[in-house]
Image: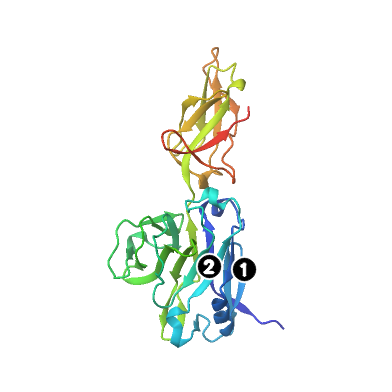
Amino acid sequence: MGMAYECLFEVVVAHDYYSESGMEAIFEFSPTTKCAELLKGNQLIIKRVTNGVKVLALADRKENNSFCVDERSRFRSNLDFKVKVIDPYFEAYTKLPCQLNSICVDFDGGEMRVENVKRALKSVAVHIGSGVAVDNLSCYDSLGQELGGYVFKKRGDDIFLDLSKEAEGGYFIRQDDSPIMSLFVAESLEASSFYCSVNVGDCFDDAWCFSKSTLKVGFEAKSGYWKYMIPKAGLNTWNTILIEDKDKEGPVSFDQSGEAEDFIEMISDRELKLSKVCERVFQLKGTTIQSATPKILVRHLPVPKKNHIQKRDERGRTVSEIYVIL
């Protein structure tokens, strides 16, 4: 008869674009040797899930919400999970620098790990929880000083903390007067890799007690102007052309930005997140001299692909060039 296990905690790292377009594997988790030994010593097992990992404990375990660490080294006994980026197109959609090669999520029961820190990552969205009142949340530094400029965003019922400033120490998130999470995000000078250090529980004496069962750390997608390259060869009979956004709420407009040798260029009036590509429906329409009523030339204009490379135009704008086939 098999033994019954239940989930002690789960960690999921997800990119904004993929989290909205399907459960595709971008990251692969593996524990460090020290982490694996610590889990094994507490009779815990690891189960890999898409873009994350679950740590399971025996269902009849007396203290199923905590596990013990070596008291002599508990402040250095982090649970480190190396995260390998396995999707070759990940970097095309993220704001993170190209040298990203790993992420380490640390469950730290004691002091924050801050050695070899050069600067903090920007545009990191941390999942705080569901059904949390934003007005009751606040962010503090490691000295207990409340920090301004950190935005709590609401997406549906989920609350995220958007870290837009450089970090010089730990972040502590409080709901009313109760701490619910601490976070440190930094770049390692030695390995040129990035890690997130997240505490999801409180350390009492020689054991960790987990207050959250699931943690999601997500990285926002890039934004940029969309420039449609429309071939002149297919527009001989059309007097004017326009691009119409079918989204009625906050529609995007496109203006002709120039003409290449074989193309008419039409660029969006504002930046668009690449994570929204599946939500946008743009139509190409045209009018003739005989009729001013626009007719549909292309019902669904293409959107950037996963392997899309953004460029800088002459005005310094980040632009996604999208070629249209008529």
211 over 140 or under it: above or below? below
Q: Quadrant of residue 146?
A: bottom left
Question: Where residue 19 sits in the image (x, y, percent)?
Answer: 55, 54
237 over 226 or under it: above or below? above
Q: Is residue 82 left or right of residue 210?
A: right
**Residue 130 appearing in the image:** no
Q: Which residue is mark 1?
A: 48
The residue shown at (56%, 52%) is: 90
Which kind of residue does numbered mark 1 sit on?
Answer: Arg
The residue shown at (53%, 58%) is: 14
Which kind of residue does numbered mark 2 sit on?
Answer: Val
Q: Report the front residue among 130 and 110.
A: 110
Quadrant in which the N terminus appears: bottom right
Q: Which residue is mark 2?
A: 11
Furthest residue toward top? 290
Q: Mark 2 or mark 1: which comes first in sequence?
A: 2
- Mark 2 surroundings within 10 Å by alpha-carbon count, few (fewer than 14), some (14 through 19), many (20 or more): many
Question: Where residue 179 sits in the image (x, y, percent)?
Answer: 36, 71
303 over 130 or under it: above or below? above
**Marks 2/1: CA–CA distance:** 10 Å
Q: Disc 1 on helix, strand or loop?
A: strand
